[in-house]
Amino acid sequence: MDISVVIPLLDEQDSLVELHDWIAQVMQSNQLNYEIIFIDDGSRDNSWSIIKKLSTKNPSVLGIRFAQNFGKSQALHAGFEKAKGEVIITMDGDLQDSPDEIPELFQLIKKKKLDIVSGWKKKRYDAFITKNLPSKLFNWAARRISGLKLHDFNCGLKAYKKEVIKNIEVYGEMHRYIPVLAVNSGFKNITEKVVIHQARKHGKTKFGMERFINGFLDLITIWFTSRFGKRPMHFFGFLGVLMLIIGFTFAAYLGIDKLYFNPTGRLISDRPEFFIALTTMIIGTQFFVAGFLGEIILQSRSNKERYHISEDTITK
């Protein structure tokens, strides 16, 4: 199998037939052995019926159907588990990504021995205020925090070497940061390619402004997990030691002042420094407990399935 095309989708009934025919034509004209994996993320329209018809028409079409909407990351994770191709191409199901890009992405991975080729929608056909401007700000922040110099983290059109997607776990809403997850797993041969971005022909976008807020929160999460995910006590222990030092410093000051300089003055418990010392020592202890719990969870963590697939999933 040369290529697996993984397509997560939600309510894209008007685009699926055209997208399938376009991909099939590109693959046949380039003599590529392929499979198309559609992941129906809880669509409420006729998307699943169309996928079943396409599977009957084309044996290279597979389908996974979620019982409800679990999100793009879970859809990609399910598709990655089923993918058999040497190169995995991800793209959206709304026809804004061009299948004509697939052969060149495939060749970049194979001939240059790259791990990931990430698409860059340099010229976009989205609303500037609601999508383009927030996307530029988001990508700038992502580059600064992650250290990975990509222009477009959100681009759904990407190509992966098989070993990459089989060795990373996409969870939550981390689909934007698969290249970062790959780097953290040791895959560092990453480049990007300017790709064609097309105006949406059918339906409407499934993402609003909240995706950028969630994206920034996820970025903080991935920064933290990449630095301290395998050693949580290093982070929480440092903060705990800092708080305890502050607390014991104030406690020592109060004790020395009461014993030697102001024995007949106010009670220690009546002074504000007492409450600072007490609060910081309690917080420091809590940080240590959080670190211990993190270490315990890390050691006992198991990879549990995060979605439920309905019984009429198509496999071949």
Image (tube, rainbow, N blue to C red):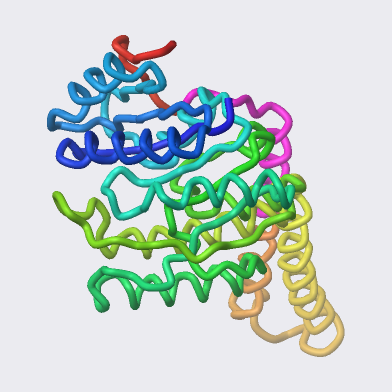
Dividing the picture into quadrants, the one containing residue 9 is top left
Q: Quadrant of the C terminus?
A: top left
Q: Position of residue 41 (x, y in %)?
A: 30, 33
Q: Quadrant of the N terminus?
A: top right
Question: As displayed, is residue 312 above or below residue 50?
Answer: above
Dividing the picture into quadrants, the one containing residue 193 is bottom right
Question: As displayed, is residue 2 above or below residue 145?
Answer: above
Q: Is residue 232 visible?
A: no
Q: Position of residue 175 (x, y in %)?
A: 48, 48
Question: As displayed, is residue 306 above or below residue 286?
Answer: above
User: Horizontally, is 299 left or right of 136 in the view?
Assistant: right
Front position in the image: 18 or 273: 18
Front position in the image: 227 or 96: 96
Region in magenta: 286-305
Front position in the image: 266 or 24: 24
Q: Position of residue 140 (x, y in %)?
A: 51, 76
User: Horizontally, is 276 left or right of 94 in the view?
Assistant: right
Q: Position of residue 280 (x, y in %)?
A: 66, 66
Front position in the image: 273 or 23: 23
Task: Confirm whether the magenta stretch covers residue 304.
Answer: yes
Q: Is residue 18 visible?
A: yes
Main SS class of the magenta portion in the image:
helix
Task: Confirm whether the magenta stretch covers residue 300.
Answer: yes
Question: What is the residue that sits farthest to the bottom in this orientation?
Answer: 261
Dividing the picture into quadrants, the one containing residue 106 is top right
Count of marks overlaid on the render: 0
Residue depicted at 14% across the width and 28% down the height:
46
Residue depicted at 43% across the width and 33% down the height:
28
Residue depicted at 44% across the width and 47% down the height:
173
